[in-house]
Image (cartoon, rainbow, N blue to C red):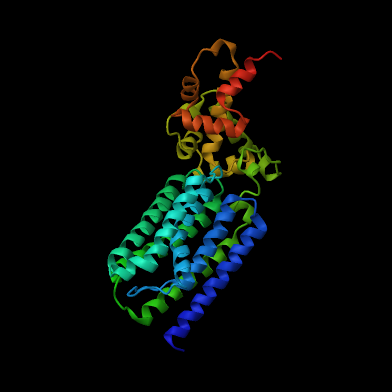
Amino acid sequence: MTFTATELAFCAASVALLLVLGASLVADFRNVLAARLGAAFALGSAAHAASYSVGVSSLAPASHAPLIALSTGNIVVFWLFTRALFDDEFRLRWWHGLIWGLVTAFSFANCLWIVAGGSVRLAVTIVNLIVLGFIALAVVQTINSWSTDLVERRRRVRVFIVCAAALYGGVNALLQIGVAGTEVGDIADTVNAGVLACIVAAIAYAMMRVDGAGLFPLTAETARPIILSQSPAAEQASDQKLIDALMRLMADERIYRQENVTIGALANRLKIPEYRLRRLINQRLGYRNFNVFLNNHRIEEAKAALADPAQAEVPVITIAMDAGFQSLGPFNRAFKAVTGVTPTEYRRLKASPA
């Protein structure tokens, strides 16, 4: 079998797996933003598998330009996918689509005109620096938010998915920058196609090993605090004592007011391993994210203060910061997500006569 035929086989396998993965996500979790973005990322990755070559030395055929553009724009989808995957409260904004459109349009113009002008290395370098920038954003956000995820199996699978995709994309971007304008031969393209096929197969296998409901919330409501029904194992005396001790820390000491409180610090206060505290908050109290757990207690305190006639003249920002929020913007968003109204509207409603 020639290198070209082997490369084609690897590409076909990757495209087939990615299309099946995307279709599966849409079929099972079409109402979940992270799953929809995951399906879009799978489709963009299929375009990448069908269009990518390590060396770029000439003008791309016009028929390949749309695939290459979608492949480049897919890095923005990857960034948004990681945002939604690690933050159940993440929402798409209009400017997210604008960023994707600008990156895709630039890649399209790059294929048809910029490379044709003879500036191959410059054009390829700019595109791949954009790719590296979005990969860096995704990795930084993944690291920053990973510790607050309370769903243990989801944490492991998501880190694997993000690291595998980021590593492959980063290596390829650096490789293209290094060999832009050169002919690297069929071997490099075949190796690249083989590596991509292996990574796609590994991601598909990993996602099959974890319960989809653990990876993605079934509905928007499941991302909010919900008290789950207690199983016999969860009613063990030792676990109940820990839950009671945790609630005392929240109610009596109001530890959620402390700046930069972490689940590790809370576990140390309770003298238990961090993984056990994650499990208790997730499985016994129904939270998927540690920050949501903290914010729920902060918002309950803020609601009481806003409804108190004696604090009618206290500024909202003061109430927010007393409850543990660091600024007004995050407080307003979290408060409205829980109550459906802004803090000012909530105060006015409570002040209105019945």
The x, y position of residue 258, in whole percent, is 45, 28
> Taking the image as drawn, is residue 163 in sight?
no
* x and y percentages locating residue 316 in the rendered image: 50, 21
- Depicted 2 relative to depicted 179: above or below: below
- Picture residue at 63% right of the left edge, 36% below the top: 240
Q: How many marks?
A: 0
> Residue 161 in the image: x percent, y percent?
49, 59
Q: Residue furthest bottom?
A: 1
| Residue 77 horizontal side relative to residue 123, left or right | right
Towards the viewer: 262 or 142 = 142
Q: Quadrant of residue 259?
A: top left
x, y (%) of residue 341? 60, 28
Q: Give the vertical position of 247 relative to 70 (above or below).
A: above
Which residue is at a point 58% across and 30% down the rendered structure image? 247
Q: From the viewer's side, name the closer residue of 251 and 34.
A: 34
Q: Is residue 194 above or below residue 329?
A: below
Q: Is residue 32 visible?
A: yes
Q: Quadrant of the C terminus?
A: top right
Q: Is residue 228 left or right of residue 167?
A: right
Residue 206 horizontal side relative to residue 327, left or right: right
